[in-house]
Image: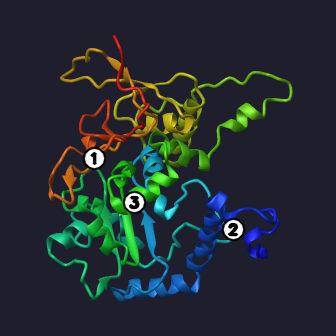
Amino acid sequence: MPEEKLIGGLVAPGFDENSCLSRYQSQNYEELHQRCGPSTKSYNEAVKQLKSGHGVDSSECKYVVWISFSGLGNRMITIASCPPYKLDLFCEPFPEISLLLPPDFPIIRKFDKFNHIYRRSFGKMLKKNLLNTSTKSLPSYLYLHLAHDYDDLDRLFFCDQEQNLLEKVPWLIMKTNNYFFPSLFLMPSFEDELGRHFPEKGTVFHHLGRWTILKDIYWQNPTVTGDIIGIYQPSHEVHQQTEKKLHNRKAWAEMYLLSLTDVLVTSAWSTFGDVAQGLGGLKPWIMCKPVSQTVPNPPCCRIMSMEPCFHAPPFYDCKAKKGVDTGALVPHLRQCEDMSWGLKLVDSHDEIYDIVW
């Protein structure tokens, strides 16, 4: 086996590369970042294209810029929705290469203007017929509005025929507060590869979260004296304060502590609870949301899987070009327990609606 395949001695000679593809694919991905990261020749060329206003589908380096948006729970589940681009909210995964956008990025001052009516958004440019697969002069960037208030044209992001165009654009700027991973499983261009990486569909976020943060460190490394560690709620914030760093630190501490519990009860529509259950590999009881100030009967139920809910999925069949219940197309996608229009990943062996009477 060539020396470079041994990764500096980490892999023994004679090791079958096909038996552990992820190890080599990770190395290749790191090399890609070293070629394409900030301050590299490829990055500088891509920035020149961005400034020119015209994109060229010629470089191996394509970029997705994720805009931090909404509460910390939303930020954590949305960044996990970007697996093809391997973004990381908590650390810099590769030495000497940053995933943070440089402060002198040419259009960074426009980010505050990016919303559902922004004229350079993917949906708005489709509406004006400014985009199609035969476009000779590509835009230098496109804004992808995938937040809760996106419209039907923005939702065409989840159609393969539109992905054929998007993959050619050198810069994609994404803003979302949704865990849109479930809808990627309905796209043929993503489905096969995602299926290989995540054969158990109901554990996608659990694995993505554990790759970044492992709770087992506390179970595997008890205190020297054997003392029992008590866990106490570190805050009583009451209201969400999205842009306050101290508030977010307290929120993260609480989500992490909740993920260490044996039994968990969460409230409906809660991304805060979604993160805790996903990191902990838990299927909590969920308190149903009151309707017209009336407590539902039953008041709570057991969730189907530990996966977060996609709160604003598309209801559209891209091939048939008509509306459809996307929660009824494949066995591993169902409607959410606490939101009838939501969509979540499940496994065939997951229990369905274990009700508390």
Q: In the rendered view of the protein, which quadrant contains the C terminus?
A: top left
Cα distance between the residues tagged 1 and 2? 37 Å
Mark 1 and mark 2 lie on one chain; the one further toward the N terminus is 2
Q: How crowded is mark 2: few (under 14 residues within 10 Å), some or many (20 or more)?
A: few
Q: Answer with left or right where residue 104 lies relative to residue 336.
A: right
Q: How crowded is mark 3: few (under 14 residues within 10 Å), some or many (20 or more)?
A: some
Mark 2 and mark 3 lie on one chain; the one further toward the N terminus is 2
Residue 80 seen anywhere in this rendered image of the structure: no
Query: Residue at label 2?
Result: 95
Q: Position of residue 23 (x, y in %)?
A: 66, 61
Residue type for callout 3: Phe
Q: Residue placed at 14% from the left, 74% from the top?
A: 128
| Relative to 317, residue 189 above or below | below
Name the image quarter holding residue 327. Answer: top left
Q: Position of residue 342 (x, y in %)?
A: 28, 40
Residue type for callout 1: Ala
Q: Which residue lies furthest to the top in this view?
A: 357
Mark on residue 312? Answer: 1
Q: Answer with left or right where residue 55 lies relative to residue 13.
A: left
Name the image quarter holding residue 307. Answer: top left
Name the image quarter holding residue 349. Answer: top left
Q: Residue placed at 22% from the left, 77% from the top?
A: 131
| Relative to 142, residue 274 above or below | above
Residue 130 seen anywhere in this rendered image of the structure: yes
Query: Residue at label 3?
Result: 190
SS label for mark 2: loop
Mark 3 and mark 1 lie on one chain; the one further toward the N terminus is 3
Q: Residue placed at 29% from the left, 65% from the top?
A: 160
| Relative to 60, residue 21 above or below | above
